[in-house]
Image: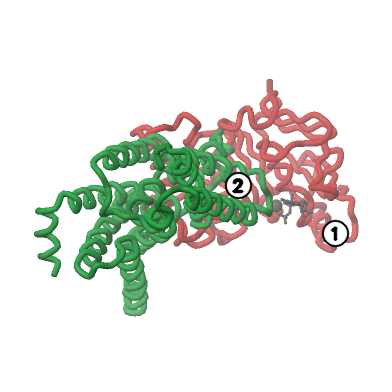
Chain colours: A red, B green
Amino acid sequence: MNEVISFQGVNFSYGKNKVLEDITFSIEKGDFAAIIGPNGGGKTTILKLILGLIHKEHGTLKVFGQDPAKNNLKIGYVPQFSVHDSSFPIEVEQVVMSGLLNSFSFGPFYNKEIKEKVKDALAKLGLSDRAKDRFGSLSGGLKQRTLIARAIVSQPQLLLLDEPVSSVDSSVEKDVFEMLNEFNKTMTIVIVSHDIGFISGFVNKLACVNRTLVMNDAKNVTFNDIDALYKGNKVGINHKCGI
Amino acid sequence: MMMEFFNAVLTFNFLQNALAAAFLASFSCGISGTFVHINRITFITGGIAHAVLGGVGAAVFFGFSPMAGAIAVSIVFAVILGLIRFNGGQHEDTVISALWGCGMSAGIIFIYFSPGYAVNLSNYLFGNILLVSKGDLISLSILAAVVFLIMAVFYRQFAAVSFDEEYARIRGLKSSIIYIVMLIMIALTIVVLMKVVGLILVIAFLSFPSATASIFSSKIPKIMLLSFVFSFVFSLTGLGVSYSYNLPTGAAITLVAGFVYIISIMIRRYYEKLF
Ligand SMILES: Nc1ncnc2c1ncn2[C@@H]1O[C@H](COP(=O)(O)OP(=O)(O)OP(=O)(O)O)[C@@H](O)[C@H]1O
Ligand SMILES: [Mg+2]
């Protein structure tokens, strides 16, 4: 069973707004896949479908061979926006701990094993000395790193990241990608990104989504192709996103 | 002045009961108020508090125990409002207002047709901590214990759902059920507070201590502990003031709480400018 995610002819709309049409692709174990595309193209929607937060209309969608949401504890997720109330009384450490929560987490305390894992995850993201900071007081980039730590603390088999580096500076961005490359040894990764420059060096699959989707083997795509494609999309004339 | 009050406490049974009730109310309020504050659900809380009068009124009218009526109705409303939160879409506000108004009006009408209309109504609306009996104290203790137990069991899940509902759902937590359990905990606290400050002042009493506490701390357990301490101090002061000057107790307690909250905000503003 090497197929981690498989979409076959999946459609989705928000009300009358057809967001995704006839999406077909598959992600195999060990892949490092990137999803790119213009704003509103449906990238976040694809991740939400995988997590079972919203439901497909037609087609088949399997995650770890089962319906979405069945295996969410095997998935780490970094959302695109931090929608959290900035005055919320929670420390960085606690945010990361919540990545290990499940429906059997009763009682007020976290055990030692959990605390060790959290320490590791914080260290990996260079947040060790921020552990006791209030989450809401962090800068955007540090918030994103905290949310990455929350996603990887459970050592998931599949890691979904929705523009995780949109507000970290470019040196950190490179570090984050190198770290993801390291994680890729044990995790399948799907990343939504705008920064094709960095991505192209790391990923082995590239999907471009703009209502419909085109999947490519990253090796066959040169940097120039991607650059051209992306610029084309930014102008936003063409509704098809073909390579 | 306060000395006089403390002497009176040592002498009079009813004041001892009042202190015990204030302690139990502050304890529950420290726990539930904190979750009301971090979830910013004062409006929902107000809705439950006012609608509870419907249950109390029905109980008075049909001759049941008013506290049993209050408990039953507050739990029912907690469940309804929880369901609305997750399925009601944009009309949440309107529905809460409707329940708020209808529940309260039904209560007033029920009580209107019962003997002792005016006294009864004002006791429930404004509380009468000086009338708390030994029997009441037992029920209040049980309620406070249940509130504590719910919090202790669900603490991490409550915190997770409050902070990031979507992520909690991804981790397999049943957000809507957890949210409803949290509202039930708050509803039981409302019943305790009804005795002390009355239904109308419940929202104020639930929000001032935790709002004040969160000025001084940014950890949920600390905020709970601090708001417990604050509410107890506020209640004692309010009780003392009302005893000395013969003022309505619930209103005196609430005014003390509101006054301290405003002072705390000003002090914090001042220090923020200083550093
Ligand atoms: N909750 C929602 N309700 C209604 N429509 C929505 C909702 N979320 C997204 N949409 C619509 O779905 C379409 C796809 O949105 P999506 O968030 O998937 O785009 P995206 O590719 O992630 O864009 P971006 O690059 O801006 O993040 C957009 O047209 C958007 O308006
Ligand atoms: Mg998006």
Labels 1 and 2 touching (C-beta < 8 A): no
Mark 1 vs mark 2: same chain? no
Reading the image, the residue beneath label 2 is B85
- From this viewpoint, is residue B269 visible? yes
Name above or below for residue B215 compared with residue B127.
Answer: below
At label 1, counting other C-alpha atoms closer than 10 Å, the crowd grade (few under 14, some 14-19, many 20 or more) is some
Q: Nearer the viewer, residue B209 or B53?
A: B53
Decide if ligand 1 comes within 8 Å of the CB at mark 2: no
**Which labelled disc corresponds to residue A177?**
none
Count of numbered tags: 2
Mark 2 lies on a secondary structure that is helix
- From this viewpoint, is residue A109 visible? no
- In the image, residue B69 lies at what x, y percent? 45, 40
Name above or below for residue A74 compared with residue B198.
Answer: above
Tag 1: residue type? Gly
Name the mark nearer the viewer: 1 or 2.
Answer: 2
- In the image, residue B104 lies at what x, y percent? 53, 53
Pointer 1 chain: A
**Which labelled disc corresponds to residue A232?**
1
Mark 1 lies on a secondary structure that is helix
Image position of B222 (left or right of A167) = left
- In the image, residue B188 lies at what x, y percent? 41, 43
Q: Nearer the viewer, residue A101 or B138?
A: B138
